Each structure stands twice: as structure tokens, then as C-alpha cells.
Image (cartoon, helix red, strand yellow):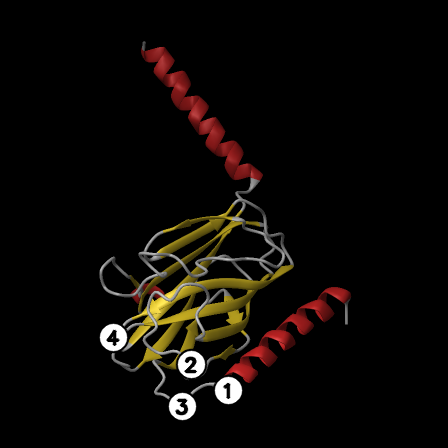
Amino acid sequence: MSIRSTVIARSFAGSLAIALILASTAHTEAAEITGVNWFSGVASVASTVFSPPVAPNNDNVAGSSLNSIFVTQKDYVAIGPVDLVFDLIDTGGVTEYVIVEGVQNNTGLDWSGYHIELGFGNGAGFVPSTPGDGLDFDSPDFDSPVFFDPSPGFFPSQIVTVDDILAGGGIMPDFSFAGNFVFTVDVPDGISSFTIRQSPIAVPEPSSTILGLLGLLGVLAYRRLER
């Protein structure tokens, strides 16, 4: 096994061990999230670990929520979305979850950003969440981790709205692994499921950039001739 593979395997094992400890110590109150399925033609999901919420109905808690979900690895082999669909039951309020994920870039391309959005359904049937429906990224206070990439910090800058996170400000190289993408979701009563859609953003190929510049130069030259 290569050094890189050993590091990735240890990261997976560490995240899974933490998740199992949380699951074994969680309270027995009814879980708001009762199941999860993933849908994608461009990636695979290694495993997802969740348990009944330790602190149900804890909306807008300051700091990291006690309710954790671990997505051990999403392995992208092409650019496109991964839809994680969570099944729900009501608990009498809004429960805040912190999501911890591992992400592998095996697309053959470097990434310049990462887009996460909330919604419903999957694939061509995905419908984005809208402000005011109660499903959000810890809005309006944003006082819990909204997007945190501590290891190794590929995307230090984020634009965060109620239902969208656009992370960037760096490069995630091809064949690299991020051990902890962390973000927070408020999940309301009254819906049977919701979706977290995630999509990497590839660095534009040099040929595309050159074609764009040539097109712009052509437009400028045409405008000069019209004067």
C-alpha cells in the first residue's frame, strides 16, 4: 500500500471510530434523520454513519452541534453532483446537525472550488431549497461551523447564503484527499426528506481560457470597426 493510501485509510478509520463512539453513547430519543441514500453517476460514497440526535430540537445552538453525521468518503471520478438524500421523522422542532465528510479527487482535474446546496429530490428531479422553508445552513445566525476545511485547507474562502455554500480561494489537486469538510444544517419538522447536493468545480482548461480570450478580443475588434 502506498503512503498516500495508508494516510487515507487511517483518516477513514479515525472518522469511523469517532462516529461509532457517538452512536454508542447517543440518547435513545427518536431520531429526526432515519435513513440516507446517495445518488450519483460521477462518484461513490464509502459509508455514512449517523445515530439518534443527542440534542434534538437544538436549533441555532452556538458552536458545533452535538448531533453528528459522518460521510466517510466521497470519491469523485468525474465532475458532477453527488446527492445525499436523508429520510426524516418529526421531533417537534428544528434539529441542527453537523456534517463531517471525507472527499477524494480522482477526476483527473484540479479543483478550484466546491459547491454545496440544499434541496429536495435527486438527479434531474432535484429542486433547490428556498429561503423561509426552514431548511438552511444555520441561518440566520451562522454561529456554528458553516464550512470548515481544516485538513489540509484547500478552500479557505467561502460565500455562504441560506441554502448555498460556495467554497474556493485555493486549489484541490487531482488525486488528493480532504479529511474534514465540515458544515452545519438546520433540519425542520414537516418534511419527509431533504437533499445535500455537492459538486466540485474544475479549474478551467487552458484551451477553454484561450478560446474565451480570443472570443472577447474578437468582440472588441468588431466594436472598434463599427465606430
Eye-nearest disc, 1 or 4: 1
Which of the two labelled residues, at mark 2 and mark 4, occupies the earlier sequence position?
2
User: Can you identify the residue that label 3 sits on?
Assistant: 28
Kindly identify the residue that appears in the image at 47 percent across and 51 percent down: 167
| Mark pair 2, 3: CA separation | 8 Å
Determine the secondary structure under disc 1. helix
Q: Residues within 10 Å of mark 2 (few under 14, many from 20)?
A: many
Determine the secondary structure under disc 3. loop
Q: Which mark, residue 54? A: 2
- Give coordinates of residue 66: x percent, y percent: 45, 74
Residue 89 sits in quarter: bottom left
Callouts 3 and 4 close, C-beta under 8 Å: no
Residue 177 sits in quarter: bottom right
Tell me: 30 left or right of 203. Answer: left
Residue 122 visible in the shown view: no
Callouts 1 and 2 close, C-beta under 8 Å: yes
User: Can you identify the residue that label 4 sits on?
Assistant: 191
Q: Amino acid at mark 3?
A: Thr
